[in-house]
């Protein structure tokens, strides 16, 4: 079992901040099950800084940050798998997130359609609602 629990993708954080909350994410945070990585934080931080939402950014930084260990061979294999299965326009950051989720046996909470498409070809737990 992974020491980490649920990796919260930037798509969920964006919806969370836009809508004023998501019950499932609130529960994961309260139960200390939510975590992020540097890619997700980097996707969110510039916009938060631009809007001077420092308190929100500090809150995100307080969530468990899991270290990245990128295996470029696996990333290339995932992208080849995507191309063979007509799963197009998947960015490298999403592939790195996917590698981390699979390697560390975590769940992924995401609204990004690419993860749902990749789940048809790889085994990982995806939370979408």
Image (cartoon, rainbow, N blue to C red):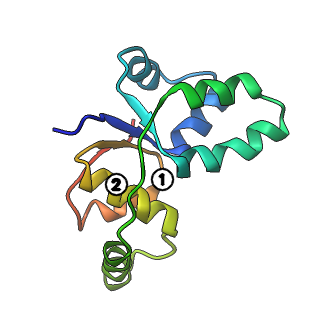
The image shows residue 47, relative to residue 53, as above or below, that is below
Residue 57's image quarter? top right
Foreground mark, 2 or 1?
2
Residue at mark 2 to residue at mark 1: CA–CA distance: 16 Å
The image shows residue 64, relative to residue 103, as above or below, that is above
Residue 10: x and y in percent read: 55, 44
Question: What is the count of numbered marks?
Answer: 2
The image shows residue 102, relative to residue 80, as above or below, that is above
In-image side of 101 versus 21 (left or right): left
Residue 39: x and y in percent read: 54, 52
- Label 1 crowding class (10 Å Cα cut-off): few <14, some 14-19, many 20+? some
Dot 1 corresponds to which residue? 112
Residue 40: x and y in percent read: 54, 47
Asked if residue 19 can be seen in this view, the reply is: yes
Residue found farthest to the top: 30
Q: Secondary structure at mark 1?
A: loop
Residue 100: which numbered mark, if any?
2
User: Which residue is located at x 46 percent, y 19 percent?
Assistant: 26
The image shows residue 85, relative to residue 58, as above or below, that is below
Q: Secondary structure at mark 2?
A: helix
Quadrant for the C terminus in the image: top left
Residue 28: which numbered mark, if any?
none
Asked if residue 127 can be seen in this view, the reply is: no
In-image side of 77 versus 23 (left or right): left
User: Which residue is located at x 26 percent, y 49 percent?
Assistant: 104
In-image side of 36 versus 61 (left or right): left
- Label 2 crowding class (10 Å Cα cut-off): few <14, some 14-19, many 20+? many
Quadrant for the N terminus in the image: top left
Q: Mark 2 or mark 1, which has the lower sequence index?
A: 2
User: Which residue is located at x 72 percent, y 22 percent?
Assistant: 55
């Amino acid at each position: 079992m992974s020491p980490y629990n649920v990796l919260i993708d930037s798509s969920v954080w964006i919806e969370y901040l836009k809508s004023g909350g998501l019950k499932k994410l609130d529960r994961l945070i309260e139960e200390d099950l939510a975590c992020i990585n540097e890619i997700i934080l980097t996707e969110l931080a510039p916009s938060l800084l631009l809007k001077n939402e420092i308190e929100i950014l500090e809150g995100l930084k307080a969530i468990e940050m899991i270290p990245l260990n990128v295996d470029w061979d696996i990333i290339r294999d995932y992208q080849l798998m995507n191309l063979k299965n007509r799963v197009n326009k998947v960015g490298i950051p999403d592939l790195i997130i996917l590698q981390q989720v699979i390697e560390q046996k975590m769940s992924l909470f995401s609204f990004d359609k690419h993860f749902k498409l990749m789940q048809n070809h790889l085994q990982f737990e995806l939370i979408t609602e």
